[in-house]
Amino acid sequence: MKETISNTVRFTAFILLALLMLAGLNHLFLYRDKSIWSTDVRMKTYQELPENSIDILFLGSSNIMSGINPVQLWEETGIQSYNYCSRAQSFAFSYGYLTDALKTQSPECVVLDAYSVLLDKSSNGIIDTDFHFGINMDNLSPASRTELLKTFVKREEQLLYLFPLLKNHNYYQTWEHVEDETDQIFLGFCPADLTEPYETPAYTDATRPMDEIDRIYLEKIIRLCQEKEIDLFVIKTPVVCSDSYHSVLNDVKQMCSDLQVDYYDMSEDARDWGFDYSSDMMNEYHVNQNGARKVTARLGRILTEQYGGSVSDTRISQWFWAQESERMQKTSP
């Protein structure tokens, strides 16, 4: 009897030790991104924010990363915001991030970029499958992660995403060759100095349906904000795209109108607020640092007028934004 108990204890201890080792290896092989586009750093900084200190939460892709500067917004309006973005962030991922973000913050308004509908997706709605999931899965809660896995990944492949050791075992070869650029990320914003001149685009009034997966998750975001009594403001930062692509944005505009959500395509009146496509674009889909100053200033005026501006005025919150403002001044050229 004693020998049986002893063997059971040894076996249990072995299993527990094996599980701990597997968990350790699993963590070791998570994708580590030190580039200026790093999702890891953006999510970590968000988690360090004082609880309930956010007035405005920005969600979106790299359009938001390079297009909206929370430091400038705070300096000019007092609005405390965070650029909670990730590369190629589709509406599905925006929904996951929003669900997680609301666990520690209660923003007055969520500003959502509509770029998701301009992204080319595979038949099952995934954007650049390996890269997109490899970057994002560790930054989501188990609940959000599970929903995305069920929505986008075949059952037989889900294990690869739950255990990065199985999928990312070769990433370690690149770790020491990646330059750390994360000191250039400021509350989620990263300035872009490159300039590519473009003609001011002309748009169509035609409408083309967005992908069904975008429609499903845009509605989920709208319903979640309504449930939490959070204002939702859907925008599109200036882009240079064809009539075919812009016609899909018109479908977003119509859906927002039907569901009583504010929508603003910043390209439609860009000239009126001083945006210049010949000097303010980094490439077709991203504004540069000069363009970001104009986009942020424009949104600051609208947010102040429509959503009441700043509501967070605690001492620790003000210190946090002031600290980021000082850091940005020291590192800017």
Image: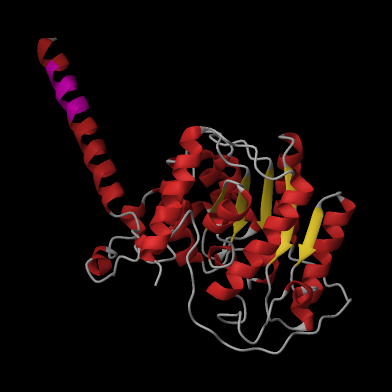
Q: How is the image coloured?
A: secondary structure
Q: Position of residue 202 (x, y in %)?
A: 80, 84
Q: Is residue 37 above or below residue 281?
A: above
Q: Position of residue 125 (x, y in %)?
A: 63, 63
Tell me, yes or no, if residue 122 can be seen here: no
| Number of numbered discs overlaid on the protein picture | 0
Q: Is residue 290 above or below residue 2?
A: below
At 70% from the left and 90% from the top, the residue drawn is 199
**Left or right position of 29 against 280:** left
At 53% from the left and 63% from the top, the residue drawn is 65
Near-viewer residue (266 or 114): 266
Near-viewer residue (18 or 271): 271
**Left or right position of 155 against 307:** left
Which image quadrant is residue 291 in? bottom right
Q: Is residue 315 magenta?
A: no
Tell me, yes or no, if residue 257 can be seen here: yes
At 60% from the left and 80% from the top, the residue drawn is 281
Q: Farthest residue in the left direction?
A: 3
| Stretch in magenta | 6-13
Q: Position of residue 310 (x, y in %)?
A: 65, 42
